[in-house]
C-alpha cells in the first residue's frame, strides 16, 4: 500500500510540473514583435489557449508560410469582446505577434486586425 501511495505522489508531482511549464511564456520573444499578413486557415476556440493558423502572404518568387499562433483562453478573450465566430476560416488578417525564440513559425498573438470587417481585437 505504501508503494502505491509513493508512486501516486510521484506521478502527481511529475504531471504538475509539466502543467506549470505549459503556461510559461518564456518560449516567446516579446522584444521582437512582428506583423504577419495573410489568410486564416484555422481558428480553434478551445481551452487552454485559442489558436489561429495563418498562411502568410507570399513575397515575390516565394511561397507563403504557415504560422501557428496562440492567444489566451476563450474565457479571457470573451471578456475582451471576442466570440467563437470573431475570426472565420478564409478571413484576411493582420496580426502582431511575439515570435517563438527558436525561430519556428509560431508566436503569441498580441493584436488582430480584420481589414475586411474594419475591426481590431486585442489578444
Image (cartoon, helix red, strand yellow):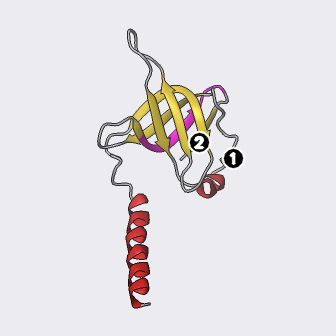
- Give the total number of marks visible in the rendering: 2
Q: Is residue 117 above or below residue 86?
A: above
Comparing 39 with 3, the one in front is: 3
Residue in view at x 44 percent, y 79 percent = 8
Tell me if residue 114 is in the magenta stretch: yes
For the N terminus, the quadrant is bottom left
The residue that disc 1 covers is: 83
In the rendered image, residue 101, in percent from the top left (x then y), is placed at 30, 43
The residue that disc 2 covers is: 121
Residue in view at x 45 percent, y 33 percent = 67
Q: Is residue 14 left or right of residue 74?
A: left
Neighbor class of circle 2 (other Cα within 10 Å; few <14, some 14-19, many 20+) is some
Q: Residue furthest top?
A: 61
Q: Is residue 102 above or below residue 20?
A: above
Q: Is residue 7 above or below residue 39?
A: below
Is disc 1 placed on a helix, strand or loop?
A: loop
In the rendered image, residue 45, in percent from the top left (x then y), is placed at 63, 47
Tell me if residue 72 is in the magenta stretch: no
Question: How would you classify the magenta stretch by its main secondary structure?
Answer: strand
In the rendered image, residue 4, in percent from the top left (x then y), is placed at 43, 84
Neighbor class of circle 1 (other Cα within 10 Å; few <14, some 14-19, many 20+) is few
Q: What segment carries the magenta color?
A: 107-116
Amino acid at each position: 500500500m505504501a508503494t502505491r501511495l509513493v508512486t501516486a505522489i510521484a506521478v502527481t508531482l511529475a504531471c504538475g510540473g509539466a502543467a506549470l511549464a505549459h503556461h510559461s511564456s518564456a518560449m516567446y520573444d516579446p522584444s521582437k514583435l512582428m506583423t504577419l499578413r495573410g489568410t486564416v486557415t484555422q481558428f480553434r476556440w478551445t481551452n487552454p489557449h485559442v489558436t489561429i493558423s495563418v498562411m502568410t502572404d507570399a513575397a515575390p518568387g516565394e511561397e507563403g508560410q504557415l504560422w501557428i499562433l496562440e492567444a489566451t483562453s476563450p474565457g479571457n478573450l470573451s471578456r475582451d469582446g471576442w466570440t467563437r465566430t470573431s475570426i472565420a476560416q478564409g478571413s484576411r488578417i493582420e496580426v502582431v505577434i511575439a515570435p517563438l525564440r527558436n525561430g519556428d513559425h509560431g508566436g503569441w498573438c498580441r493584436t488582430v486586425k480584420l481589414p475586411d470587417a474594419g475591426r481590431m481585437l486585442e489578444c
